[in-house]
Amino acid sequence: MSYFQAIVIGLLQGVSELFPVSSLGHSVLVPALFGWHNLVTDQSAGESLYLAFVVGLHVATALALILYFWRDWVRIIIGFANTLRNRRIVTSDERMAWLLIVATIPVGITGLLFEHTFRTLFAKPEAAAIFLTINGLILAGAELLRRRRSGDAAGTSTPPQGADATDRPPGVATRQLSSLKLLDGFTIGLAQILALLAGISRSGVTMAAGLVRGLDHEDAARFSFLLATPVILAAGLLKIPDLFGSLGNGVRGQILAGSIAAAVSAYLSVRFLIRWFRTRTLWPFSIYCLAVGASCAIYFS
């Protein structure tokens, strides 16, 4: 792996992990499109240099998320400690702590049991293209269902300050993030399981599930990014010994370069997306996934 490849994939990881377009899908499709066939082959190998490299990128992305949301995480950790001491959930921070725990359980168990199987079976360009197309349909379906449930309130409600009517997400939130029940968190967490398939976006499906549960776009995005942090970090830390074993030999410099690129692009991405979803929707990402997924499916068929 060259330094150029490492930086390109690192930048791609940081952006596509948070944008609802699937980092795993792009880590399969982009090397295939660039002709980096050795990296594509390594995707589905049991142990590989490329997987050790991806571990570093995941840890870097998670650290960027922690840096951006550090104030939230301080409150959440304190809230969790309070629930253990008082044996009850009172504040929104205490509720958020348990929502994140409950929502992480489904993908945590499924990932430990089936991540290797899913990767070896589906981490191929043809499959990634198909699942990327399905991801676009999921995003579109969530937007259509939200519009149907809330009605076309965009024409009657007052737009947010500084936003045009055309920028405002259609419909209105039916509930606040602080009102989610633990069952809602578990349901949104179930959606993360789909992200084990290359081409299905973790942030995309969790945002879609949040919208279906009645959240607005900004709250759905915030919960999605908070929920992604422990999952991404755990996935990296569980395999961190690979970086110091034989798989990391000869590529530790590339891993560092790619990880720095991933951290910077992830931090900038989350800043952009939090602002984007205050007034805008998932539609552009849905259209992108449908167009790129269908084009790549045809190209690799």
Image (cartoon, rainbow, N blue to C red):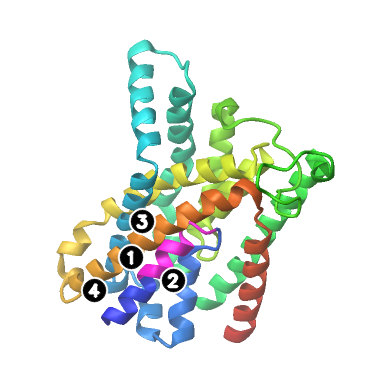
Q: Amino acid at mark 2?
A: Ser
Q: Residue at x 41, y 44 (%)?
A: 108
- Mark 3 is on which residue type? Thr
For badge 4, the amino acid type reads Gln
Kind of residue indicated by mark 1: Val
Please give the label number shown on residue 54: 1
- The mark that comes first in sequence, 1 or 2, is 2
Whether residues under marks 2 and 3 lie with C-beta atoms below 8 angstroms apart, the answer is no
For marks 3 and 4, the one nearer the N-term is: 3
Cα distance between the residues tagged 4 and 2:
16 Å
- Indicate which disc residue 61 carries: 3
**First along the sequence among labels 1 and 4:** 1
Q: Which residue is mark 4?
A: 254
Q: Position of residue 15 (x, y in %)?
A: 45, 63
How many numbered dots are placed on residues in this image?
Answer: 4
Of callouts 2 and 3, the N-terminal one: 2
Q: Nearer the viewer, mark 3 or mark 1?
A: 3
Element assignment for label 3: helix
Seen in the picture, residue 273 relative to 4 is either above or below; the reply is above
- Identify the residue under disc 2: 27
Quadrant of the frame with the N terminus: bottom left
Q: CA distance from mark 1 to mark 2?
A: 9 Å
Q: Residues within 10 Å of mark 2 (few under 14, many from 20)?
A: many
